[in-house]
Amino acid sequence: NRLREQIYAISVRVGSVPTLDDPNSPQSRASDWILEECNLGAINYCSESEMLLNEQRYALAVMYFSLGGDDWNDGANLGQIRDSPAGTWLSGSNYCDWGAEVSGGTGGISYKQLVCDEFGNVLNLNLQTNNMVGEIPPEIGVLVYMTSYISFFNAQTGEIPSSLGLIT
């Protein structure tokens, strides 16, 4: 399967290959989720022509599983329900629609959790005060067009992944 090979290639690039063998790892859970979505024909991102978008969708799914997404204040999707509304992560919709519109952020300003450009490239992630717990996964480095990652007031642990150096 071409998508499975692509996920493996991402794991080689960011140094997380051993995690794919652990069925409980965020990487394995994200891989299983995206492969199931593609097998259902639920999304268009499963074709070879959408390779960069496949990578970004996988990276965001790994982040969701790595950082306790089911318990997030905004955007949680317990059970990964496909027909969840916009603003819900891991729904069957375009990942650019996953980012919830959050009001009352720092200084009372509203913001969108996830912002993409017109080509579907993730530009900004603003996950502040979202009850994220865990380590930022190395797959964040796949989001090469990202210019802003805001995640203060969460319980993230570990080192900042060196794969962030892959971002231009």
Image (tube, rainbow, N blue to C red):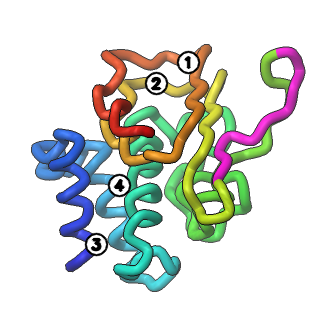
Question: Dot 2 lies on which element?
Answer: strand
Q: Is 109 one of the magenta-colored residues?
A: yes
Residue 22 in view here: no
Are the residues tagged 2 and 1 within 8 Å (C-beta)? yes
* Disc on res. 133: 2
* Disc on res. 30: 4
Q: Position of residue 121 (x, y in %)?
A: 55, 56
Using the rendered view, name the quadrant where residue 150 is placed: top right
**Which residue is depicted at the point 34% across and 31% down?**
165
Q: Residues within 10 Å of mark 3 (few under 14, many from 20)?
A: some
Q: List the residue tagged with mark 3.
A: 3
Outermost residue, right side = 108
Circle nearer the N terminus (1, 4): 4
Identity of the amino acid at label 4?
Answer: Ala
**Which residue is depicted at the point 28% across and 48% down?**
27
Q: List the residue tagged with mark 1.
A: 154
Range shown magenta? 107-116
Q: Is residue 12 left or right of residue 27?
A: left
Alpha carbon separation for disc pair 2 and 1: 7 Å
Alpha carbon separation for disc pair 2 and 4: 17 Å
